[in-house]
């Protein structure tokens, strides 16, 4: 549950490069200053995840994208660019038209998926949006594997359609007896890509989670732990069944005691919307589900939405979970960069032994190390304020083979710093054995 600060701490690249001319570091030079880098990376609504997820769905719906052996370049419009430091070596830049299909006479993919159809792949490596113009009567036109007059549809959002004109020639690759289609006007965004099939072969994509507010692994800074409210909003790529989401949504809270957050289903609001996108192939948000989260205390709260359906009955076929963290700036589970140093973590208790004073409030498993490199001692708490004795467990950073394992019970104090809590964490008989192993018991 703790943040991965290493992603952020190593995020400011300062070495430079002599191999790559004008190496564009941009954000890579300032990543250590961006707290978003250390957030949990498993955001189910992230655009890149949705693009990759759509690709996996396409491989199931169109088996040629998974198993088709045949790849043929149909046409291209490119030019050479000489980049700084290339020493005269050109970089071909522009747009390509490619056919992906089963190997004619060898492969039969009819039984392996829903659609036995070739796919027209378009992609560009231009760093800007380019509006292309082609002469469909010229042999240098931009050819499609499908016949002229066919309406084709993009398998990636925004699922736009094109009606093909008659091209100047017939290609052998897909066995079409008529002239191959052509497009005379075409716009491609920077580093764009498309996958097109005849409109009648288009398979509707599954609905997917496209946004979450206030944001996955969002940190809320609350000084007082008095159980506040948080407004949640979930975006989807198509109109969803409100009742399906309300029946599926659940909350799991890791907080002090039994003060779990709960959803106010009377506050549910569903609406349609039109949103813009930043990424090529990213699904836009078309539907928003809003609900209030009540009784939110300091700790970590996970909101999970199961396999829900759209108004058309299409299921997401996923279980999506998002996180929010609530606490003050001294809580290392919420703000690890601010709470990475404490002058009150250890204090002297009765008999001169050291005792822990933990500032984080949540049910969790924690570990500490005396020698940093060799052993870690793990202890479990039922809540941040629970006191007790555990059987602590060490994990030597050496190969497991040949390590002698033993168990040692260590009394410790866990909770707020009070004079009454002074149970020592080290045994009176001496130091912890160098090789010991056990499991925490509370």
Image (cartoon, helix red, strand yellow):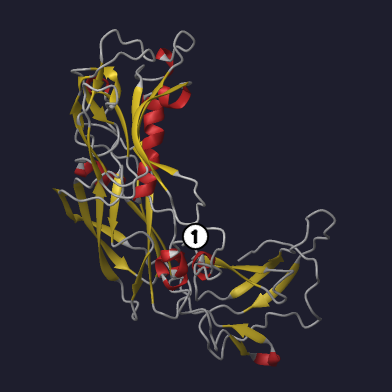
**Residue 201 place in picture, x, y as percent:** 27, 20
Measuring from the top left, give residue 300's x and y in whole percent: 41, 65
Task: Give the quadrant of the C terminus.
Answer: bottom right
| The furthest residue to the front | 88
Q: Say above or below: 179 vs 271.
A: above
Percent x, y of residue 293: 27, 61
Q: Nearer the viewer, residue 359 or 10?
A: 10
Which percent across, then down, holds residue 434? 80, 70
Residue 349 figure quarter: bottom right
**Mark 1 nearby-residue class (10 Å; few <14, some 14–19, many ≥20):** few
Give the left or right position of residue 162, taking residue 296 as reference: left
Residue 63 in sight in this render: no
- Name the residue tied to disc 1: 21
**Left-right relation of 289 to 353:** left
> What residue is at 26 percent from the left and 65 percent from the top?
230
| Residue at the image point whose x is 45% and y is 26% from the top | 66
Residue 122 versus residue 24 in the image, above or below:
above
Q: Quick one: 228 or 204, which is closer to the camera?
A: 204
**SS assignment at label 1:** loop
Is residue 222 depicted above or below 420 in this figure? above
Q: Is residue 4 left or right of residue 242?
A: right
């Amino acid at each position: 549950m703790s943040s991965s600060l290493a992603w952020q701490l190593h995020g400011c690249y300062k070495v430079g490069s002599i191999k790559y001319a004008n190496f564009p570091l941009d954000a890579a030079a300032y990543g250590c200053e961006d707290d978003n880098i250390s957030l949990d990376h498993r955001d189910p609504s992230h655009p890149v995840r949705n693009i990759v997820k759509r690709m996996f769905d396409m491989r199931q719906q169109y088996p040629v994208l998974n198993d088709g052996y045949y790849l043929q370049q149909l046409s291209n419009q490119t030019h050479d660019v000489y980049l700084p430091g290339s020493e005269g070596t050109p970089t071909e830049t522009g747009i390509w038209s490619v056919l992906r299909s089963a190997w004619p006479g060898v492969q039969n993919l009819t039984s392996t998926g829903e659609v036995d159809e070739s796919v027209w792949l378009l992609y560009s490596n231009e760093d800007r949006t380019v509006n292309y113009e082609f002469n469909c009567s010229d042999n240098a036109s931009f050819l499609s594997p499908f016949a002229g007059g066919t309406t084709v549809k993009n398998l990636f959002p925004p699922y736009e359609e094109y009606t093909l004109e008659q091209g100047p020639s017939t290609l052998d690759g897909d066995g079409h007896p008529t002239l191959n289609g052509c497009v005379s006007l075409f716009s491609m965004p920077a580093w764009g890509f498309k996958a097109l099939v005849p409109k009648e072969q288009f398979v509707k994509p599954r609905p997917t989670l496209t946004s979450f507010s206030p944001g996955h692994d969002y940190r809320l800074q609350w000084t007082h732990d008095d159980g506040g409210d948080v407004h949640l909003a979930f975006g989807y790529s198509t109109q969803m069944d409100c009742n399906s989401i309300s029946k599926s949504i659940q909350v799991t809270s890791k907080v002090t005691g039994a003060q779990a957050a709960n959803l106010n289903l009377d506050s549910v609001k569903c609406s349609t919307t039109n949103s813009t996108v930043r990424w090529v192939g990213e699904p836009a948000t078309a539907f928003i589900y809003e609900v209030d989260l009540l009784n939110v205390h300091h700790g970590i709260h996970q909101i999970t939405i199961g396999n829900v359906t759209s108004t058309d009955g299409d299921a997401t076929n996923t279980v999506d979970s998002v996180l929010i963290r609530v606490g003050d700036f001294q809580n290392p589970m919420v703000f690890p960069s601010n709470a990475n140093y404490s002058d009150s973590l250890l204090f002297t208790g009765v008999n001169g032994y050291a005792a822990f004073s933990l500032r984080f409030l949540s049910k969790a498993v924690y570990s500490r190390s005396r020698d940093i490199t060799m052993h870690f001692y793990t202890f479990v708490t039922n809540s941040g304020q629970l006191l007790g004795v555990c059987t602590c467990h060490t994990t030597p950073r050496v190969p497991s083979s040949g390590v002698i394992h033993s168990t040692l019970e260590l009394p410790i104090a866990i909770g707020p710093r009070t004079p009454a809590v002074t149970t020592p964490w080290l045994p009176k008989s001496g130091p912890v054995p160098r090789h010991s192993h056990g499991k925490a018991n509370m």
